[in-house]
Image (tube, grey):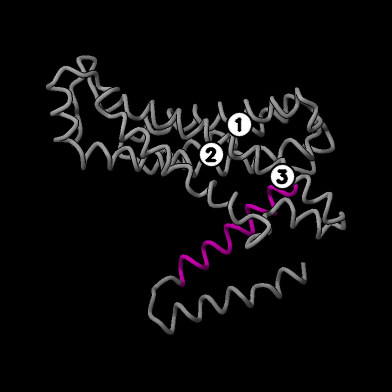
Amino acid sequence: MKEVLLALVLVAVSIGISYFRKLDLEKDLLIGTLRSFVQLIAVGYALELVFDLNNLWLILLVILIMVLVGGQTAGSRTKGSLKGFTISTFSIGVGTFFTLGALLLLGVITADPKYVIPLAGMTIGNSTNAAALALERMYSEMKNKKDQIEQALSLGVTSTQAVEHSFKATVRAAMIPTLNLMKIVGLVQLPGAMTGMILAGASPLQAVKLQIIVVYMLICAVSIAAVITSRLSQSTYFTKYHQLVIS
């Protein structure tokens, strides 16, 4: 704990910068520092309990809670909070459980909470970002291209056909962070899984092997979350008669 307290010096530097540059971020930085400390300590004790019990249903419950939190976080970025929450939670859940299930069935990982929960956390975190970006981008597409979409609808095409270009643009935008990660991983950035293993004493080659698996896992989960979120959110802007409704 002594090391953690010493690391607070770095937070003090950030607060000092905010104060002297009159950024008014001191309160946010203090609250964020306190919240991150409390949340991580609580998670640490909770994970110790889960690891000791090694119960499948408890593991699934932990993952489900993480999915719900991710869905709420992504959904809160939209005006239609209930629909956004439902869509993002579903897409994040499908991407997470499909990806982890595939890795378990293929024997890439074992059903050990020390593997499953951290990998689920990384998957859910990245899928949450993808879902949030997809929800925001789809709203922008519908709002900015309203006239074009309505013109296409007036020619007799379906709502799905009218927004196909927007759908593709939304999926691409949602996947950009993960695609960028794949391009720079190992060259510019040493990701969390790899760094954690090296700090824990594992050989760099073992760490690299795990990180490659993680990257492939993330691109699959993010692809699923981005496509599902984009398609489902798109449908919320149309009536059953294919009329565009957006404020």
Q: Position of residue 59 (x, y in %)?
A: 72, 31
Say which quadrant the N terminus sits in: bottom right
> Of the residues shown, which amino acid type is indicated by label 2?
Ser
Q: Where is residue 60 in the image (x, y as percent from the top left)?
A: 68, 27
Classify mark 1: helix, strand or loop.
helix
Main secondary-structure element of the magenta-colored stretch? helix
Say which quadrant the C terminus sits in: top left
> Of the residues shown, which amino acid type is indicated by label 3?
Ile
Residue tagged by mark 2?
127
Q: Where is residue 208 in the image (x, y as percent from the top left)?
A: 77, 50
Residue tagged by mark 3?
212
The stretch in magenta equals: 26-45
Residue tagged by mark 1?
96
Who's the residue at 49% across and 36% down the image? 71
Who's the residue at 52% across and 68% down the image? 30
> Of the residues shown, which amino acid type is indicated by label 1?
Thr
Who's the residue at 74% across and 57% down the image? 195
Who's the residue at 73% across and 24% down the image? 57
Q: Are marks 1 and 3 in contact (CB under 8 Å)?
A: no
Of 168 and 20, which appears nearest the observer? Answer: 168
Q: Are marks 2 and 1 in contact (CB under 8 Å)?
A: yes
Alpha carbons under labels 2 and 3: distance apart: 18 Å
Is residue 9 left or right of 134 when viewed as pictured? right
